Image (tube, rainbow, N blue to C red):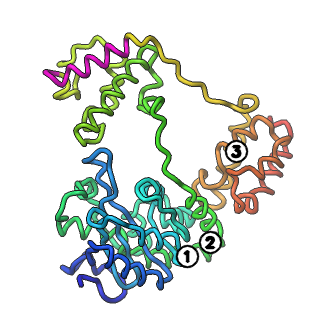
Amino acid sequence: MDVIAGPVNGAGLEQTGRDPGEKITTRARLEEVVESAQRQPRVAVDLESNNFHRYPDRVCLVQLATSHAVYLVDPLSIEDMAPLGELLANAAVEKVFHSANSDLRLLDRDWNFPVRGLFDTSIGAAFVGSEKLGLAAVLTEYLGIEIDKNKKLQRADWSRRPLTEALLRYAALDVFHLDRLTTLLYERLDQLGRTEWVKEECQRLEGIRHVAPDPEWRFLSVKGSRDLDGRGLAVLRSLHAFREAEALRCDRPPFRIFSDAVMVELAASPYSDLPRVKGLGRYGNGRLSLGVRHAIREGISAGTVQRPRKRTAGIRENRTRLRLLKDWRAGEANRLKLSAFLLWPTVSLSRLSTTWTDGLDEEMESKEVRRWQRQELGEALWTFMHRCPVGNC
């Protein structure tokens, strides 16, 4: 077997010609790996998808690492990935991710797998005061190890087989050092008294699920759409629908059809000469341009589109009060040497700016405010707000 033997630590994988890990291509072997991993206290996890090359994308590789081995699981060869789901759902085995957010959504979307017993090393690093939270930066800061986060490899087509040795090694490095990194982060967090803070943040992260965008309004997420009037939004909606259909037809990500910026430009100036529109590429001439022209005409004839108004509870926020609350948060962040955005949710401060002390007790129990925030900062916030009861001190 191509398994790395011995402790997975040090900088060995980068500096040797050893195989990066065992390639798992059958359910039977996956079951054996999971059975072994279930007896470990901790397993590192990462995913690779083909979102830069295929549409819709899918998970193309799952990397697992224990303290003694790395496994590269090929879901394109294994029809039933249920054993992986059993491992991820076992809270007795800690699952270590780095920046788990998108991976959790992919696991839920592709297989409906929840994760229990999660530890996110990017969150751990943030709570010990790191400013740069990418994996390469965190490994350098805490382990003195440098790994090459090559964009070309990161954005490779992970659905192509066989995967090159360079890609396999790149994938293995994403999990190879996470066990040792986690141990070190726990030591730092314990010293600072912040271990429970991070555990609560990671428990909340476990609740992340994939939510498909609303097909009726997803075009409003296009950058620059807020600058368009009602007619422009109607054209954008039509162009967005055309691009989506083309992406599915061609099995290519939408941005590889043409960019958001091109759509916004055409929506703002629908009578543009298509061959002169930069970035439209082959969709500016010939047969493919006919679909673009048809989409623009449909958008123009559809009339205007009004952007839905966001529902806001209560009165509008008081900007002066909100500034005072953010200044308070910044002061606490400086005291704790942490990013201000970790300390108290902005949405909570926004609500407090409308009610001030009248809504403080209720806000302390809101779902956005963490237990550790109430315990560490609740008294300080109460004192600050009662020092100037009308919020104009």
Question: Is residue 172 within the magenta segment?
Answer: no
Magenta region: which residues?
285-300
State the mark number for residue 186.
1
Residue placed at 45% from the left, 66% from the top? 97
Residue placed at 26% from the left, 47% from the top? 54
Instruction: Tell me the CA gap for discs 3 and 1.
Output: 29 Å
Q: Position of residue 230 (x, y in %)?
A: 47, 15
Task: Tell me which amino acid carries mark 2.
Answer: Thr
In the rendered image, which quarter is residue 92 located in? bottom right
Front-most of 255 and 30?
30
Report whether 383 appears left or right of 141.
Answer: right
SS majority, magenta: helix
State the mark number for residue 195.
2
Specify which label sits upstream in the sequence, 3 or 1.
1
Question: Is residue 297 within the magenta segment?
Answer: yes
Residue placed at 61% from the left, 52% from the top? 340
Depicted 384 relative to depicted 276: above or below: below
* Residue behind mark 3: 348
Q: Position of residue 216 (x, y in %)?
A: 47, 29
